[in-house]
Image (spheres, rainbow, N blue to C red):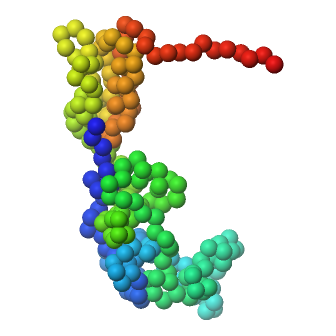
Amino acid sequence: MMRITVSDVMTKQVVAVEQDTPFKDVARMLVANGISAMPVLDSDGRVIGVVSEGDLMRKEEFREQYHGESYQPSLRTRLRRKVTDRSEDGGTKAAADTAAGLMTAPAVTVAPHASTVRAARLMDEYGVKRLVVVNEEGRLEGVVSRRDLLRTYLCDDEEIRRRVVAGITPRDRWNDRDGIIVEVHDGIVTLSGYIDRRSQAAAAARTAERLDGVVDVHEDLVWRRDDILELPFTWDRP
């Protein structure tokens, strides 16, 4: 069964910054490259965090708040900053002048061989829009974003059909009279035809559901024999 992995959809040309890069240089790199965040690397090239526009803006808010400017962050913003913006050395991001001090650490990472489903779950779990892709040594391989993951659903219908058919055992594929017919329209897979056992229908549906790029599966198979054991419902009275 073919699965789309993170390495298939990730962006491999990634702008990164070293940990001792000054604040202004970090800002210039973000603006010049039209990006909102970038990985931070240590002296060995390993990913140690991510620095974003939001990290830099918190420092600017701090400067304006404590240097007599008219701008005042909301009470919620100030309280959140006090709670969450502490760095390892006991200072604050607002007082930091390098990428290492400004960054959010640790970075939320994923392996290049991980499935796109795994990547999507990590994004949802951590509430982030992108993941840094690292190898086993923690070195940068790329970045995968929500937009990259959505590309898996743009797979050609004929390619999806080919993958579904390839995942169905040869004896269950369509022949002169019996077998499974696979049709795909806009990523929606429809399984129809006549087969011997109900378990064959269930297996074919599972095969299609697990394939990347499949939006939905409609199972309309007719089977002759129910070989899936269904236990009768019993009510245990006290």
Residue 148 to residue 35: above or below: above
Residue 156 x %, y %: 23, 38
How many numbered circles does the render carry?
A: 0
Q: Nearer the viewer, residue 208 or 237?
A: 237
Residue 78 shows in this picture: no
Residue 140 shows in this picture: yes
Identify the residue at the far right of this view.
238
Q: Is residue 209 left or right of residue 92?
A: left
Q: Is residue 156 left or right of residue 95?
A: left
Image quadrant holding the C terminus, namely top right
Q: Residue at x 31, y 12 (%)?
A: 195
Residue 88 to residue 124: above or below: below
Residue 98 x %, y %: 45, 87
Residue 99 to residue 187: above or below: below
Q: Is residue 121 left or right of residue 79?
A: left
Q: Nearer the viewer, residue 199 or 15?
A: 199
Q: Residue at x 45, y 74 (%)?
A: 49
Image quadrant holding the N terminus, namely top left
Q: Residue at x 52, y 87 (%)?
A: 96
Residue 116 x %, y %: 37, 49
Residue 114 x %, y %: 36, 53
Q: Residue at x 78, y 16 (%)?
A: 237
Identify the residue at the far left of this view.
176
Q: Nearer the viewer, residue 237 or 181?
A: 237
Residue 137 location, quadrant: bottom left
Residue 13 location, quadrant: bottom left
